[in-house]
């Protein structure tokens, strides 16, 4: 399946990129090769093949997240250049 010039231009517009004439010709060929390969993959018989999302068997290791007081809170506040009570004063950023 060879893409037409108009199809490549439409794809470029959808991607919000501008292409030169040389790039359009280049991508006509390159995108056509990708589509031909995808077409070959569609012809592969996958009956009886189990779907998988990953192959390593690794899983995320998560821990419970618990809020707690920091033992360094008072030291941090005391060492901060400008603070009031238990609040840190910073420069206005807006």
Image (cartoon, helix red, strand yellow):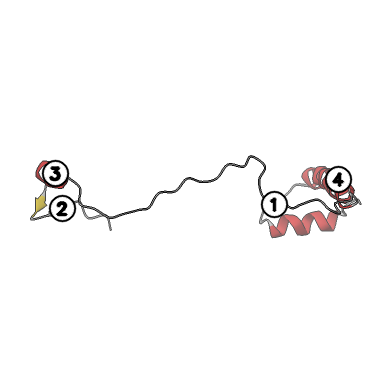
In this rendering, position of residue 66 left or right of residue 82: right
CB under 8 Å between callouts 3 and 2?
yes
The residue pinned by badge 4 equals: 37
CA distance for labels 2 and 4: 60 Å
Label 4: few (<14), some or many (≥20) within 10 Å? Answer: few
| Label whose residue precedes the other's in the sequence (3 or 2) | 3
Label 1 to label 3: alpha-carbon separation: 51 Å
The residue that mark 2 highlights is 89
Counting labels gives: 4
The one of 73 and 27 positioned closer to us in this rendering:
73
Q: Decide: few, some or many residues near mark 2? Use Cα within 10 Å; few <14, some 14-19, many ≥20.
A: few
Residue 42 point in image, percent of width and height? 87, 52
Q: Position of residue 4 (x, y in %)?
A: 88, 54
Q: Residue at x 80, y 45 (%)?
A: 27
Q: Secondary structure at mark 1?
A: loop
Looking at the rendered structure, the secondary structure element under dot 3 is loop
- Tell me if 1 is positioned left or right of 67 in this view: right
Q: Looking at this view, is 56 or 76 the one in front?
A: 56
* Disc 2 secondary structure class: loop
Instruction: Give the class, few, some or many, for how many residues have Cα within 10 Å of label 1's Cα (few <14, many ≥20).
Output: few
* Residue carrying label 3: 80
Percent x, y for residue 51?
74, 53
Q: Give the spatial CA distance, label 4 vs label 3.
A: 61 Å
């Amino acid at each position: 399946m060879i893409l037409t010039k108009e199809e490549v231009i439409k794809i470029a517009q959808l991607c919000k990129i501008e292409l030169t004439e040389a790039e359009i010709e280049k991508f006509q060929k390159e995108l056509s090769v990708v589509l031909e390969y995808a077409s070959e993959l569609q012809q592969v018989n996958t009956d009886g093949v189990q779907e998988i999302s990953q192959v390593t068997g690794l899983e995320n290791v998560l821990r419970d997240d618990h809020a707690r007081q920091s033992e360094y809170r008072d030291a941090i506040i005391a060492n901060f250049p400008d603070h009031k009570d238990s609040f840190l004063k910073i420069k206005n950023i807006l």
